[in-house]
Image (cartoon, grey):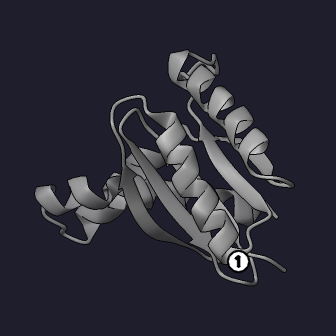
Amino acid sequence: MKKVLGLDLGSRTCGIAMSDILGMIAHGVETFRFKPDDYLTCAKHVKEIVEENDIETIVLGLPKHMNGDIGERGQISIEFKKQLEEMIEGINVILVDERLTTVVAENQLLFADVSRKKRKQVIDKMAAAAILQGYLDRG
């Protein structure tokens, strides 16, 4: 089995998580920062990680409104999926509903008594890990 990459894409950051080799446990890797709306730079960074770790599948969070509608942020994720698929040969990009994953990550950090400053630094990679773990748990 190969590792799976999880992404939580924002307008200036991308939370990145990776599974273990068995595809059972997700862990946060980093929060990649880029210039506002510079998704090409982000995609290039993701490509490097994919190539370094022999990744075949990316799980990309799809932000939806609470009523299930896909708004502007969701459309950006859909376009980013296409960009990754064009840029990385043979990659399988799966969009998954990411509603409330940031809330879950925030609650975990609050429970662990992580300071506000530190939470801001790690929240995106924690949300990516929550997105990926949800996918892995569904098997």
Q: Nearer the viewer, residue 29 or 33?
A: 33
Q: Is residue 8 left or right of residue 132?
A: left
| Residue 101 percent coordinates (x, y) | 49, 47
**Residue at 71% over, 67% down:** 4
Tell me residue 123's x, y (percent): 33, 55
| Residue 100 appears in the rendering | no
Quarter of the rendering occupied by the C terminus: bottom right
**Residue 93 screen position, x and y as percent:** 76, 47
Q: How many marks?
A: 1
- The answer to whether residue 37 is left or right of residue 115 is right
Residue 50 falls in which quadrant of the image? bottom right
Q: Is residue 45 visible?
A: yes
Q: Quadrant of residue 1?
A: bottom right
Q: Relative to the observer, which residue lies in front, 105 or 87?
A: 87
- 139 over 77 or under it: above or below: below
Q: Residue at x 79, y 77 (%)?
A: 2
Q: Dot 1: few (<14), some (14–19), or many (≥20) neighbours within 10 Å?
A: some
Question: Please, which residue is most extreme toward the bottom here?
Answer: 21
Query: Up-down: is 110 above or below 42?
Result: below
Where residue 62 sits, quadrant-wise, is: top right
Q: Nearer the viewer, residue 82 or 100?
A: 82
Residue that label 1 marks:
24
Residue 125's spot in the image, x, y percent? 42, 59
The three-letter code of the residue at mark 1 reads: Met
**Residue at 18% over, 69% down:** 113
Q: What residue is rendered at 51% in x and 24% in y?
A: 73
